[in-house]
Amino acid sequence: MDKIISLCKRRGFVFLSSEIYGGFGSCYDFGPLGAEMKRNIKQLWWDEMTKKQDNIVGIDASILMSPKVWQASGHLTAGFADELVECRKCHKRFKLDELQKNICPECGGGLTKPKKFNLMMKTFVGPVEDDSSIAYLRPETCQGIYVNFLNVMNSMRLKPPFGIAQIGKAFRNEITPGNFIFRVREFEQMEMQWFSPPATLRKRSVAMRAGNPKDAKTPDDWFEYWKEQRMNWYIDLGIKKENLRAIEIPRKDRAHYAKRQIDIEYKFPFGWKEIEGVHNRGDYDLSNHTKHSKEELKYFNPDTKEKYTPYVIETSVGVGRSALAFLCEAYSEIKGGRTETTKSVKEVEAVLNLDKRLSPVKIAVFPLVKNKPDLVKKAKEVYQLLKFKFVCQYDEVGSIGRRYRRQDEIGTPFCLTIDFETLENDDLTVRDRITMKQQRIKVKDLKDFFQNKFRNDRG
Ligand code: ATP
């Protein structure tokens, strides 16, 4: 893990927030490469949900919402609180279930009785800071979807089953943040809420709409469907099957809204940990918002004249947490290096075997040497040609071997070298990170070549 953290900092993936002031509260900043990688993850998830799947639309709700939302959702009551004890001596707080003994693990002091501690971050809206102006930074993005249920369904003329997807920031005042970007207090979630008719309605719906197997699925069937879809997403993006598992969460450990819950876990260097939750939230959220807002969050089926509250299956994943899983999976070290790039057998070469769809830099462009103006000029032309379409890096510093190594370390799939032949034949060498194969491609064909390489292509 230390090696991955060091690579992240050294190569501009992740920095400590407010680092020059010593950092701040388990917050992290994504650097140039981290920001690109995160954008790739979000785009891939968005395409997967809104393009590959049927009947899913996206929204972008605001972070600040009426505090009534959090009353209705159960977050202001016991549902979103951890049981904590405080050390009477050093005043540090600990989760009750994480303590081995009944004394403070830091200083050995005595502990208070457990108290509920709400994980939501508070702020004030408007000029006066009093109880009436308290607002909360959302601890999950999905409530923005539930409160917009009618708006989205009506404006888009949707009928269940349909889904609403959203990517956005969420905030939790975590008691025990840690493991780098695994558990932080400010993070981004990618959530999809799937609204389908409850099972009790199924028979009637099936009869009414014979011939459409989609309508025959119960929320339990959809749960299985989404679990499968989400597991496959990670595998398709390069996570090995043996490093991924789905764990059924028993009732006593489930989130307060969940009728059924599985955690998709990844085998991090620090152990098996959740990267995504798939939840059957039943009608918990829509029913509670209906009760509190007095707006009927229901669907009226004009064919059967039935009105019902759809059941919700949720898929919920953190962008940073999944990025960390992809980075851990991709990180490898080659002892003695790759012959092409490393001279000394003692050297260890770090390679990020990222799926090229995730790679922050897609193409690196090198002139063979930097002291030949014609080569440099040509290499810069090639860089200009490609950089609007693909994220490119131009590098002329050091030997070609060193430059390959720098790109291998950040997972760049393709390196282009402009050499003396280029000036004569207008072609250049394309080196593939995975196969290490080199081929010559005409400059005029480069755009098509890479468009093909990056079109729906795996690996
Ligand atoms: P955990 O048990 O790890 O705290 P959770 O069960 O509270 O997670 P959910 O509420 O199901 O998490 O949130 C869904 C997803 O959001 C998680 O699988 C994770 O990817 C992400 N997530 C939740 N909390 C954090 C956090 N503090 N930092 C980073 N990502 C988070």
Image (cartoon, rainbow, N blue to C red):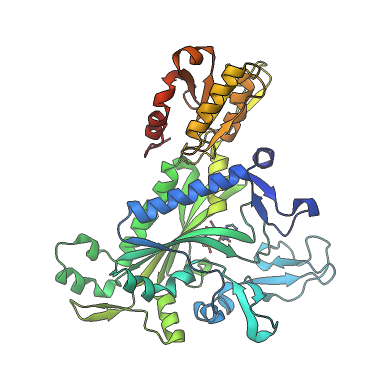
Give percent across and percent down for residue 301. 23, 76
- Which residue appears at 18% of the width and 78% of the height? 304
Q: Position of residue 403 (x, y in %)?
A: 62, 25
Residue 338 in view here: no
Could you say which quadrant of the image residue 280 lies in? bottom left
The image quadrant of residue 171 is: bottom right
Tell me how many marks there are.
0
Q: Residue at x 76, y 75 (%)?
A: 112
With 195 as the anchor, is 64 left or right in this view? Answer: right
Whether residue 164 is visible, yes or no, is yes
Seen at 59% across and 45% down, the residue is 34
Q: Nearer the viewer, residue 181 or 81?
A: 181
Location of the N terminus by quadrant is top right
Q: Quadrant of ligand 1?
A: bottom right
- In the figure, 364 relative to 115: above or below? above
Image position, residue 317 (x, y; %):
50, 56
Vertically, is 70 above or below 370? below
| Quadrant that contains the C terminus | top left
